Image (spheres, coloured by chain):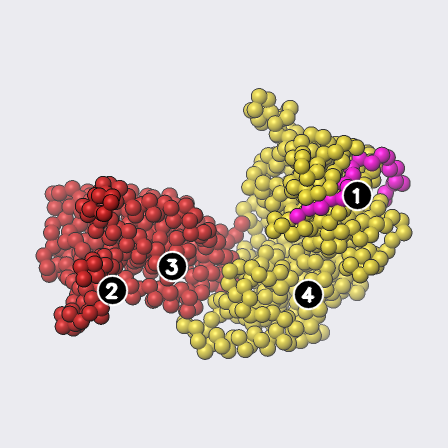
Amino acid sequence: MEFLSDIASLINSTLRISTPLVFAAMAGIFAERSGVIDFSLEGKMLMAAFVAAVGSYFLGNPWLGLLLAIIACVSLSMLHGFASVTYKGDQVVSCVAINILIIGLTTALAAAWFGQAGLTPTLNEDQRFLEVNLPFAESLKDVPIVGTIYSDILSGHYIFVYLAYLSVPLVFWVVFKTSFGLRLRAVGENPSAVDTAGINVFAMRYKALAINGVLIAFAGAHLSTAVNANFFREMSAGRGYLALAAMIFGKWHPKTALIACLLFGFTDALQIRLQGVELPAIGEIPVQLIQAIPYVLTVVLLAGFVGKAIAPNAIGQPYIKER
Amino acid sequence: MVSPILELTNINKSFGHVHANKNINLKINKGTIHGIIGENGAGKSTLMSIVFGLYQANSGTIKVNGKEINLKSPKDSITNGIGMVHQHFMLVENFTVLENIILGFEGELVFGKNLEKAKKDLKNLCDTYKLNIDLNSTISDLSVGFRQRVEILKSLYRGAEILILDEPTGVLTPQEVDELFKILRSLKDEGKTIVLITHKLIEIMDLTSEVSVMRQGEMVGHTKTANTNKEQLAEMMVGRSVLLRLDKSQLKAGEVLFKVKNLTVKDDLDVTRVKNVDLEIRAGEILGLAGVTGNGQTELLEALSGIRKVESGEIYLEGKKVSDSQNFLDPRELKDKGLAHVPEDRQRMGLVTDFKAYENLIFGYHDQQPFSKSSVLNHSDIISHSKKIMEEYDVRPQSPNLITSNFSGGNQQKIILSRELNENPKVLLVGQPTRGVDIGAIEFIHQRLIDMRDRGAAILLVSVELDEVLSLSDRIVVMFDGKIVGEKDNKNVTDRELGLLMAGVV
């Protein structure tokens, strides 16, 4: 029985930990499928976390914080588009600039407004998102199996967790079942084909980046107004890069990217669970070793263990119409 | 008098300092196949890109069916019934045929009813014009000929009444060209208007009823095809009279310089592509290797030049064994022994197209005097050498500092040829020397090859252009399915005989 609840809690934390990765990976899919590299997921996630926390603190409503975070992230995506789509700059350089800018900006603004470098005030219950208990979770709790799955694994998450997993089929549907998705995929593969079909290549890339901004904002808000009750310095902690890795590992496809995110989330959940646990025959594993698991896995996966990942053909190349 | 379906008046277009189109006037009549001929870089493609709305003219007017139209993007031209099949296909390779065709014309936000209708309409179009395309196949699985058909189908589906084809035969095999011409004729019979951009005179004579000639950005003449001939058109294109037949001196063949014995070669997929081939080339002789693309010529040429491993058999240079399955000389060592190679695919293997002309002009010889001294490049010597050689080989423009990709196909080929011929090789391997090259440059390249022969080099000419093989070679061998299926003396052979050998019939 204890083993079962162990498993349940492990799955439960996997779902929670994977949430920002899923949002970020879905955001990345939109940008990169349109042919624009997005290393700036990390910076945008951090920006969203900061803006959501600050917005919610001043306005007293986490939803308004989220809205501001969306506006901030879409603006950053537009900035990236302005530099790399309109002005045909190097996309990686533009992303790195955004990432560095945000690390400094969030720290500096927090210091200026709250007197603490890179820390915002703790949010009270009205200012943050709370865990959502699904209907009948309490009454079903004691039913074997079903109860464990429903009450212990599925119920009791933050709203973002549910939204993240709902976003995956939605992204799949948009990318593969709509005309917008067809154009999106085409513009990342062969922009000339899109142009000669009478579609504006630049407008398509800006649209993709706007969606990218909205999705990544959810990841940041999840960090600072749901799982945590404030923003702290560099709280995105590389999740943007991890999500990018998951997206590549998932071959720019929402379903496989989701699996990759869950895998990363699971190793993270596992390392937290394993800390301080005495394993039979081995004894206690040093905590540093355990904490390294997700990163080692990332390296192994990306080093070609999963076969060749084929990127959209035109990724990273600005579209130049006339010679 | 028929009214023109498309009328261009005083079209001008510049790219920076280059005046690509100067005061172009053109009338195209409904239901005709109208040829636009001109050398590479004459401005044909630019003009048609303007008509398709891809580029915007600096000045001038465009009328469709007598009505002036304003073309801001391809969308405008498509709605006016203009379709274009580009030289480089505008297809998304990992999409299906269907996806490529409906792109931009989905007619619905979420795929459903219209998609089913599109499938039905496309099947009807395929049947009408006998296009024989499977809508569900992925583009990357299709041959070049079929990709081109997809482009045609795409234009028709988008409602094209005027179909512009930019150099459509450049990448096709002779059979595919025949198929294409059949399709174009049936389109004409259905009342469509076709604009054919080409630099191949034979296609103009074969297919068109009217022809317009462009030279250096200007329209230099219009005529009914029936009232002209190849020589006259060639002269208009080049601006001077062109020798369409070559003068060649009597063969003075010397000793055997290059010999291939029982050679077998496999490709990257481990398929045997060259099967027990024997060849001998003498000094002062051009051996032509004819054959339809994909019968092992590419692999043979790669093996002979040291790029590909020999499976079995031997290669001899001046009587000395240079390669067999155990030991083989790499291209570098072969080059040092006097073998030069002009590869089939010049942009992939012959040049680094992003580099400047002078860099490409010395590649392979860059570490030799006077180009470099103690591993440091001698810039001024390289530039003066480049200027000299570019003048000698008539590379235009004569700017060593220009990026190679900005040269036309013919001039790129001249860059490779000048680099390889300048070292006076004993053996020269040439693949498709005039593919995508304009007529003025073809004449020049052919003359240079003859000069090499007369100076005593042994030349292997691999070409899919039968005319070229016939006019240059002293002896001709035909390759089919990896084997040499026939050898003919050039004096008494007809193209019909060769054609049968190439098709593997005999």
**Secondary structure category for the residue under label 1:** strand
What residue lies at 62% left-to-right and 64% top-to-bottom?
B146
Q: Is residue A105 left or right of residue B144?
A: left
Q: Is residue A304 placed above or below B379 in the rendered structure?
A: below
Have a look at marks 4 and 2 and say if they share a chain: no
Same subunit under labels 1 and 2?
Answer: no
Is A249 on the left-hand or right-hand side of B375?
left
> How many numbered circles does the render carry?
4
Residue A168: horizontal and vertical position, in percent? 33, 63
Q: Amino acid at mark 3?
A: Thr
Mark 1 sits on what residue?
B279
Cα–Cα span, label 4 and label 3:
42 Å
Badge 2 crowding class, 10 Å Cα cut-off, few under 14, some 14 to 19, many 20 or more, is some
Which color is chain A depicted in? red
Secondary structure of the residue carrying tag 4 is helix
Which region of the structure is painted magenta?
Answer: B240-266
In the image, are marks 4 and 1 on the same chain? yes
Which quarter of the picture shows residue A13?
Answer: bottom left
In front: label 4 or label 1 = 1
Residue under the image location 54 percent in, 78 percent down: B120
Q: Is residue B225 left or right of residue B358?
A: right
How far across and down, in percent of the image, does residue A82 sit?
Answer: 37, 51
Q: Residues within 10 Å of mark 1 (few under 14, many from 20)?
A: some
Is residue B76 shown to the viewer in this render?
no
Q: Which residue is mark 3?
A: A256
Amino acid type, label 2: Tyr
Label 4 to label 2, Cα distance in Å? 55 Å
Give the side of residue B416 with respect to residue B291, left or right.
left
Q: Earlier in the sequence, mark 4 or mark 1?
A: 4
